[in-house]
Image (cartoon, rainbow, N blue to C red):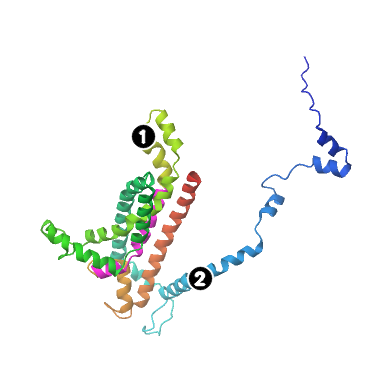
């Protein structure tokens, strides 16, 4: 028995190429450039002129966010202009003051309100988004997505007025169902949470629907073929895949509620301690005069919280996109 594998005969085209001279032989026998090599990377590298397209965005980011953030940072660590030293002296007293007393209470109040409403928005928005994603009626899906886009951006004084007219002490729904006798009040922590959910749930629908549409039908069919129930499929397959998207949506809702100002100011004023309302009072001298730089320190605290939120959100989004792409 012959253990040597038979040598394949060259095709006529290959034989013709090999007989075409040393250059043709070298060109034929040279290995192709593998993906990942330096030459391949040089061919795929974008041209330097492509960076010019990002210049307007970078300029807008530097002017719209960089300069205000720099002003807040300088103001947070310097004395105010009405100080005995004339202002501008470096100090850490503003940041220390922003983390004590009523300011610390307001910061903790904003964190509690944002965390609660973000959790409720995630829990309520997920089944609603699933119903939209699996709907056979395309018109219904488009209507819900368009409406969610509008409601997610509906806030401020108009939103506060709408709730006062319907669920306030003299609101139509409050009077019809005698909600006041049952302990309902719109101007409390609970009432403000209900108002926040009005725009956070649509925001969650917009955020999680693309991830739900990325769940493949084959995964559900494979689970069913192996005898898994619907609950088992969601517990062991769908939810682990969706978990990064759900956490990312929660973080996004938390940041949106944490930065909300106009609706809370129009509804509850200073009766509920929130850091955004404390900043407005400090800047306007509503409580104490000369607290402008403390307001800068409070703004710096909010920027730190927002940076922590984005530091959690971005890796979760990348991990979710790896599964659902």
Q: CA distance from mark 2 to mark 1?
A: 48 Å
Which stretch appears magenta? Answer: 244-267
| Quarter-of-image position of residue 221 | top left
Q: Which mark is residue 78?
A: none
Residue 181 placement (x, y as % from top left): 10, 58
Q: Which residue is mark 2?
A: 60
Q: Is residue 9 visible?
A: yes
Q: Nearer the viewer, residue 61 or 74?
A: 61
Give the quadrant of the N terminus: top right
State yes or no: residue 258 in magenta: yes
Mark 1 crowd level (few <14, some 14–19, many ≥20, 10 Å Cα): few
Measured along the vertical axis of the image, is residue 194 above or below residue 11?
below
Count residues near mark 2 (Cα–Cα under 10 Å), then give few for <14, some for 14-19, many for 20+: few
Mark 2 falls on what kind of element?
A: helix
- Tell which circle, 2 or 1, labels the residue nearer the N-terminal end: 2
Q: Which residue is found at the position 30% from the left and 71% from the top?
A: 278
Image location (x, y in percent) of residue 203: 36, 56
Corner quadrant of residue 289: bottom left
Q: Where is residue 5 drawn, in percent x and y? A: 76, 23
Q: In the depicted view, which residue is nearer to us: 111 or 250?
A: 250
Is 282 drawn above or below residue 7 in the view shown? below
Is 22 on the left or on the right of 3, as rendered? right
Q: Is residue 273 visible?
A: no
In the shown orientation, is residue 286 left or right of residue 78?
left
246 inside magenta stretch: yes
Left-right relation of 2 to 230: right
Looking at the image, the residue that sits furthest to the top is 1
**Rendered view: 215 above or below 260:** above
Near-viewer residue (120 or 142): 142
Residue at x 76%, y 41% (from the top left corner): 31
Q: Which residue is mark 1?
A: 232
Main SS of the magenta part reads helix
């Amino acid at each position: 028995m012959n253990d040597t594998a038979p040598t394949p005969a060259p095709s006529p085209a290959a034989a013709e190429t090999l007989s075409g001279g040393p250059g043709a032989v070298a060109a034929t026998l040279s290995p192709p450039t593998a993906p990942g090599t330096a030459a391949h990377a040089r061919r795929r590298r974008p041209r330097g002129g492509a960076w010019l397209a990002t210049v307007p965005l970078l300029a807008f980011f530097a002017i719209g966010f960089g300069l205000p953030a720099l002003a807040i940072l300088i103001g947070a660590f310097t004395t105010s202009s009405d100080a005995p030293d004339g202002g501008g002296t470096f100090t850490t007293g503003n940041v220390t003051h922003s983390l004590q007393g009523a300011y610390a209470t307001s910061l903790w109040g904003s964190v509690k309100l944002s965390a609660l409403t973000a959790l409720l928005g995630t829990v309520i928005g997920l089944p609603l988004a699933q119903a939209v994603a699996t709907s056979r009626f395309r018109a219904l899906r488009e209507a819900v997505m368009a409406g969610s886009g509008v409601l997610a951006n509906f806030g401020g004084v108009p939103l506060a007025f709408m709730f006062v007219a319907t669920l306030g002490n003299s609101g139509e729904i409050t009077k019809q169902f005698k909600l006041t006798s049952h302990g309902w009040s719109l101007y409390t922590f609970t009432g403000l949470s209900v108002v926040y959910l009005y725009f956070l749930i649509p925001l969650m629908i917009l955020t999680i629907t693309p991830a739900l549409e990325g769940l493949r039908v084959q995964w559900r069919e494979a689970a069913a073929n192996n005898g898994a129930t619907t609950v088992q499929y969601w517990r062991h397959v769908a939810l682990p895949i969706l978990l990064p998207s759900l956490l990312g949506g929660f973080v996004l809702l938390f940041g949106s509620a944490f930065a909300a100002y106009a609706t809370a100011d129009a509804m509850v004023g200073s009766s509920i301690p929130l850091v955004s309302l404390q900043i407005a009072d400090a800047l306007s001298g509503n409580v104490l005069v000369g607290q402008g730089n403390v307001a800068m320190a409070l703004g710096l605290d909010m920027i730190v919280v927002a940076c922590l939120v984005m530091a959690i959100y971005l890796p979760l989004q990348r991990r979710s996109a790896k599964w659902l792409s």
